Amino acid sequence: MTAARDAAVLRRKYARRYVAGRVGVYVAAITAALLCAGPFLWAALNSLKLDTDLIKPTNNPFWFNKPPTLDHIAFLFTDTGFPTFVWNTLWVGLLVVAITLALGLPAAYALARLNRPWAGWMGIGIFLVYLVPPSLLFLSLSRVVVALGLQDSTWSLVVIYPTITIPVSIWLLMGFFKGVPQDIEEQAMVDGYSRLSAIVRAVLPLVFPGIVAVVVFAFTLTASEFIYALAFIAPTDQQTVSTGVPADLVLGDVFSWQELLGATVLVAVPIAFVFNLFLDRFVSGFTAGAVKG
């Protein structure tokens, strides 16, 4: 009886400890989520406030003291170039993603699978290119843009951005290609496929998480990059979100706060939605690409 009672007491002790541990994990997770989401929630809240509600010191800053309004959001679409900025960002991002995949996939495959003695050193050299700060490159790249006749054109970003996205994409995809057994590809070739068909049908489906990681990385970098977009483009109708929004909504010492916050929310929501759709593959892409090979 004593042994059974001691065992029951021990079980209850471990059960309480387990519950306390789980509660602690959830509390920490919820706290971290609120801290990370805090700036976004604050932006969404204030973008819907009236001017008098926002600037009055006695009002509660964490809620609506007066009815919310969509006037600031409507102002973005009717009185600013925000729709143009979003469109420019979208098509530039999609083209950069396409160029990054078109050049990065073959290069990563060649460096990872063709067993050349210089492949390792070349892979490291390609990655080191990504580590060069943009502030050191935009002067020389501006000469390239002028030579191509693309100054003050959004096409200049389509030319320049792949120089940032391709090196790190190659490095990431190399880890995935090295993680795919060569037997799979060789078996496909034995079955009658050419090397290209074997890559497309047997290898690429296995490295799909890495491809998703590259797509998300390239597009988010394109949407958020500031230095090149500021240096190469001046006309309003050619600007992207990263430069067009502050240029249009910050006039001297006058800041259109609600419009700025509304633009932030409108740009962040679609990207966050798409990001969460592929979150599992994105995380597995970066973690697997970091440890393989």
Image: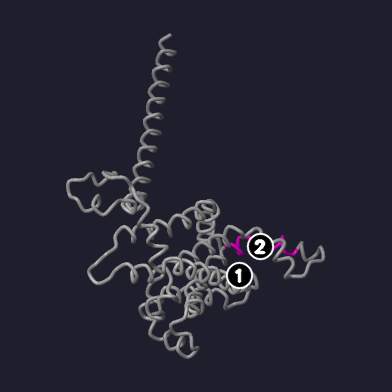
Of the 4 image quadrants, the one containing the C terminus is bottom right
**Count of marks, rendered view:** 2
Between 6 and 109, the residue placed more toward the observer is 109
Rendered location of residue 229, percent (x, y): 41, 75
Q: Residue furthest bottom?
A: 147
Residue at 17%, 49% in the rendered image: 57
Region rendered in magenta: 176-186
Question: Which quadrant would residue 34 be assigned to in this image?
Answer: top left
Q: Residues within 10 Å of mark 2 (few under 14, many from 20)?
A: some
Circles 1 and 2, Cβ within 8 Å, touching? The answer is yes
Measured along the vertical axis of the image, is residue 287 above or below residue 21? below
Please give the label number shown on residue 105: 1
Measure the C-alpha gap from mark 1 to mark 2.
Answer: 9 Å
Measured along the vertical axis of the image, is residue 149 above or below residue 121? below
Q: Secondary structure at mark 1?
A: helix
**Dominant secondary structure of the magenta stretch?**
helix
Q: Residues within 10 Å of mark 1 (few under 14, many from 20)?
A: many
Rendered location of residue 216, percent (x, y): 51, 61
Residue at 47%, 74% in the rendered image: 164
Between 274 and 263, the residue placed more toward the observer is 263
Rendered location of residue 115, percent (x, y): 63, 73
Residue kind at label 2, given as amino acid type: Leu
Measured along the vertical axis of the image, is residue 284 above or below residue 233? above
Please give the label number shown on residue 204: 2
Q: In the picture provided, is 266 more to the left or to the right than 91?
A: left
Residue kind at label 1, given as amino acid type: Leu
